[in-house]
């Protein structure tokens, strides 16, 4: 007989028995299977002997003790059968209420691992579906996902005939059965998903548990290539308490099947896209575990439209501001307006940039370089304006600046050093011409007056003084022109650096974007 039948028969017969009544137990000698230890019949018969004397307090106490001992020994006999075979459930009717009634005595075994031999490990098959990717917290290094978890294992204590009971499965409360303590090792927060209190129990002892989980797991995020980054996060499924000798965790289905079902059921179409899932069984430590690697790719269109394109527009406008003539247009006010606008743009879009102390994204470096170039161009414009509007009494250009800037950099940016002004040569030629011509020849027999000769001499001296003053002015203006030439060369050099920076940045962005979508 099964344990449930023994229990129901024994409790049914004991309801109407008084403490003073005697027991008369008879056993079928034909029962051979699962024979208990020898001598148990004699022990029970001795402790429940008939008493024909009148009922006294002494006899009453003895019979009560005998009755309790009988119940205890009977239950011990039931438990002695457990290591030998499963408890076969016999239903009185082919319906689920009768099946539930027959299973009720077995709910007391929910606190122990459902194996006949304690040296046998319980095989737990797990599977999951990624129902949604809720987000990534770069600052806290967290990945938030919504999963459907599936666990299957065998309860060796339970089996029944589906035809006799009218069903091959039944839904039961989790608290009535043993449930494995499978957890995710990287869990960092409470599971806020709805609680599912039921499990499926099948006629062969198979238990199937299905529940949702809002998983907030730790993940080592690498955001250097933001917003074209690809993240690889790990979810480790293992037992919190049982070692590998007690619990064997394995993956129920193939990784391809999990990936296919996840893409089919995923409802979130947000910032992150599921690329691939890889899983394998780890046996190196004391606990059997299943490690799943989830590869995610960020959808970069939002960041390209809101961050990169406006920044490129502003830096391009600053680039074309070099075409404005510094002699007639105040370029400094225009550049200051651009810097102010770019700063406001970065403050507004600061929420879109990831913040973490682990690494600095390449996009942040790009924004910093853009701002640095704008500030550098403003300083260069101030220098040129000062040279153009400054006094002519400036010190001559140092020799090393003449070599480095006027000769080398001027040749590289196609602004060679200008030739000196030819006015000096013309003035020298005039002086020489006057010296050669000498005093004018006498015309006719009339001799010029002495006054006319003095006037001619005075005019020559005034002309010499004028030429000397012009020569001094020419020397001062030559130094000023050299400094202005230095400013023009630096302006052309910064213009070339702008073009090179924008070209390299554009090509780098295209390459990184292409590589992220080619994986």
Image (cartoon, rainbow, N blue to C red):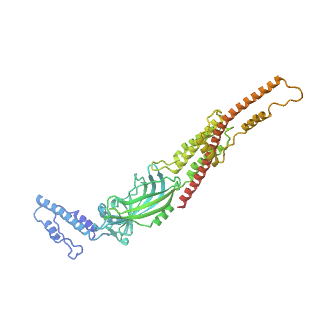
Residue 413 in the image: state x and y as whole percent: 64, 48
Q: In this view, does 405 lie to the left or right of 17?
A: right
In this view, the residue farthest toward the top is: 451
The quadrant of the picture occupied by the N terminus is bottom left
Q: Nearer the viewer, residue 500 or 448?
A: 448
Q: Can residue 38 be seen in this view?
A: yes
Q: Which of 20 and 71 is in front in this view?
A: 71
Residue 153 in the image: state x and y as whole percent: 36, 65
Q: In this view, does 29 lie to the left or right of 271?
A: left
Q: Can residue 49 be seen in this view?
A: no
Q: What residue is shown at x 77% (from left), y 29% (from top)?
A: 460
Residue 166 in the image: state x and y as whole percent: 38, 69
Quadrant of residue 87 in the image?
A: bottom left
Q: Is residue 12 left or right of residue 442?
A: left
Q: In this rendering, is residue 370 above or below 474?
A: below
Q: Which of 484 and 226 is in front in this view?
A: 484
Residue 309 in the image: state x and y as whole percent: 60, 49
Q: How many labels does the image show?
A: 0
Quadrant of residue 437 in the image?
A: top right
Q: What residue is shown at x 84% (from left), y 31% (from top)?
A: 441
Q: What residue is shown at x 26% (from left), y 71% (from top)?
A: 84
Q: Which of 278 and 421 is in front in this view?
A: 421
In this view, the residue farthest toward the left is: 53
In this view, the residue farthest toward the right is: 445
Q: In this rendering, is residue 86 above or below 324?
A: below
In this view, the residue farthest toward the bottom is: 30
């Amino acid at each position: 007989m099964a344990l449930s039948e023994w229990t129901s028969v024994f409790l049914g017969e004991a309801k109407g028995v008084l403490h003073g009544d005697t027991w008369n137990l008879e056993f079928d000698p034909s029962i051979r299977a699962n024979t208990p230890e020898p001598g148990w019949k004699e022990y029970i018969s001795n402790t429940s002997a008939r008493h024909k004397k009148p009922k006294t307090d002494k006899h009453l106490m003895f019979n009560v003790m005998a009755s309790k001992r009988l119940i205890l020994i009977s239950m011990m006999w039931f438990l002695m059968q457990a290591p030998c075979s499963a408890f076969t459930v016999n239903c009185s009717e082919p319906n689920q209420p009768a099946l539930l009634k027959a299973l009720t005595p077995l709910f007391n075994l929910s606190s122990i691992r459902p194996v006949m031999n304690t040296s046998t490990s319980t095989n737990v098959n797990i599977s999951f579906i990624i129902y949604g990717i809720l987000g990534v917290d770069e600052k806290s290094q967290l990945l938030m996902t919504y999963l459907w978890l599936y666990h299957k294992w065998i309860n060796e204590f339970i089996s029944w005939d589906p035809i006799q009971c009218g069903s091959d499965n039944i839904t039961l409360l989790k608290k009535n059965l043993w449930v494995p303590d499978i957890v995710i090792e990287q869990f960092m927060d409470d599971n806020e998903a709805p609680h599912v209190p039921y499990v499926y129990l099948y006629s062969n002892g198979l238990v199937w548990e299905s529940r949702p989980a809002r998983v907030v797991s730790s993940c080592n995020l690498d955001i250097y290539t933001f917003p074209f980054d690809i993240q690889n996060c790990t979810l480790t499924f293992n037992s919190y308490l049982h070692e590998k000798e007690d619990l064997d965790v394995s993956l129920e289905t193939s990784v391809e099947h999990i990936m296919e079902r996840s893409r089919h059921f995923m409802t979130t179409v947000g910032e992150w896209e599921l690329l691939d899932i890889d899983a394998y069984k780890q046996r190196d430590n004391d606990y059997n575990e299943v490690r799943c690697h989830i590869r995610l790719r960020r959808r970069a269109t939002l960041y390209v439209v809101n961050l990169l394109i406006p920044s490129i527009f502003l830096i391009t406008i600053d680039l074309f501001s070099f075409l404005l003539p510094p002699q007639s247009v105040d370029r400094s006010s225009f550049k200051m307006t651009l810097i102010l606008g770019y700063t406001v743009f970065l403050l507004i879009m600061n929420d879109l940039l990831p913040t973490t102390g682990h690494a600095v994204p390449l996009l942040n470096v790009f924004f910093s370089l853009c701002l640095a170039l704008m500030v550098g161009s403003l300083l260069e414009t101030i220098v040129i304006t000062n040279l153009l509007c400054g006094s002519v009494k400036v010190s001559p250009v140092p020799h090393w600046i003449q070599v480095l800037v006027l000769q080398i950099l001027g040749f590289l940016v196609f602004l060679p050093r200008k030739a000196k002004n030819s006015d000096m040569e013309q003035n020298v030629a005039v002086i020489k011409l006057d010296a050669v011509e000498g005093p004018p020849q006498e015309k006719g027999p009339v001799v010029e007056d002495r006054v006319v000769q003095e006037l001619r001499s005075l005019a020559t001296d005034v002309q010499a003084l004028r030429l000397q003053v012009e020569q001094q002015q020419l020397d001062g203006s030559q130094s000023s022109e050299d400094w202005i030439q230095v400013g023009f060369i630096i302006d052309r050099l910064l213009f070339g650096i702008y073009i090179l920076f924008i070209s390299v940045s554009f090509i780098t962005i295209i390459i990184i974007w292409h590589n992220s979508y080619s994986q």
